[in-house]
Amino acid sequence: MPRSPRRAVRPTDARPLPVGPQPIDTGTAELVPDRGETRAFTVHVNGVPSSHVHLDRPDLLDFEYMQHMAAVVDQMPPGGLRVLHLGAGACTMARWVDHRRPGSNQLAVDVDARLVDLVRTWFDLPRAPALRLRAEDANLTVAQLPPHRWDVVIRDVFNGDRTPTALATTTSVAQIAQTLRPGGLYLANCADRPPLTLARAEVATLAQHFSHVGLLAEPGQLRGRRYGNLVLVGTEDPDLLGGSGLGRALRSLPQPARVLHGDELTSFTAGARPLRDGTG
C-alpha cells in the first residue's frame, strides 16, 4: 500500500513520535504513517513491516494473521485472560487483548531491550499488572516460567523474515505446552513460502505435544501460491477448532481465511517431520 510522506505523528498524550529510522539493539525501527492518517502506522524493524498500530483503535488489527489469531481467541470462554506474548513488537495483540478482554493479565517479551523501551515511550500501553514488558530471550523466559500459568501463549518472533528455529523445535514447544493451563491455547505466526515445507514441519511438531492442532491461512496460501503468514494452533480443547464459530469468523474477515484440522490437516502435512534441536 502506498504511504504518505513521512511526518511526525502523535500518541494520545500529544508527544511527537520520531520520523525516520531509530536505532535499536538489533538494527533500526521506524514508524511509517498510513496514507492520509496521522494516528495509524506500520512499525518497520530493519526495513521489514513488523506491526501495525492505530493509536485510537486498539480493536483494529490490520495484519491478516493477527485477525486470524483474534478469531481463535474469540472462541475462548468470556472474561479476562492470562496471555504470554513471545515477541512484543509494537504490542498490537496485547492492546487488542486488553481492549477485548478487560481484566486480562499479560506479559510481552522481546529480546531487543531498546525496542521495548521505545514501545513503552511511543504508545499508550496498558500499565502493569494489565501488561508487563520484559527484555529477554523468549526461550529463556519460557524455561523459567512455572507450569500451567497461561491461558494463551502467542509466538510472534522473527529474525528478518523467519522465526528462529530454536523457538519452533519439539523442545521449545514442549516447554510452551507446559506453561499452558488445561484447555489453554498456543498460537504461532509462521512465515513460509511454497511448498510450505516449514509450516508442515511446524504442524508436525505441534502434533507431538497437543491433542488438537490447526492451521489458519488465506486459501491461496494453503494451496502454496504465495509467500505469507500462517497461524499455527495447538490446544487440548476440541471446541476451539472443531466448533462452527471459528469457521464463520474466518469466512467473515475482509480477506476470508480457512482452518485446516483433523483429517484434512493430517493429509496436508503427510510426510512432514517434527523440528528437533540441531535442525536448521
Image (tube, helix red, strand yellow):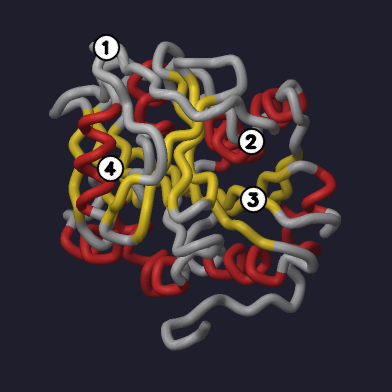
Q: Which residue is mark 3?
A: 230
Residue 23: percent from the left, percent from the top? 30, 51
Q: Can residue 183 be seen?
A: no
* Mark-to-mark CA distance, 3 and 2: 9 Å
Circle 1 is placed at which residue position? 14
In the rendered view, does 207 fall on the left or right side of 140? right
The answer to whether mark 2 and mark 4 are in CB contact below 8 A is no
Residue at left 26%, top 24%? Answer: 125
Q: Position of residue 143 (x, y in %)?
A: 22, 65
Q: Nearest to the eye among marks 3 and 2: give it.
A: 2
Q: Which residue is mark 4?
A: 108
* Among numbered discs 1 and 2, the one appearing first in the sequence: 1
Q: Which residue is mark 2?
A: 64
Residue kind at label 3, given as amino acid type: Leu
- Badge 4: few (under 14), some or many (20 or more) residues near its Cα, within 10 Å? many
- The correct choice, above or below, for 6 with respect to 210 in the image is above
> From mark 2 to mark 4, how far is it between C-alphas?
20 Å
The image quadrant of residue 190 is bottom right
Which secondary structure lies at badge 2?
A: helix
Q: Is residue 130 above or below residue 176?
A: above
Q: Residue at x 16, y 61 (%)?
A: 144
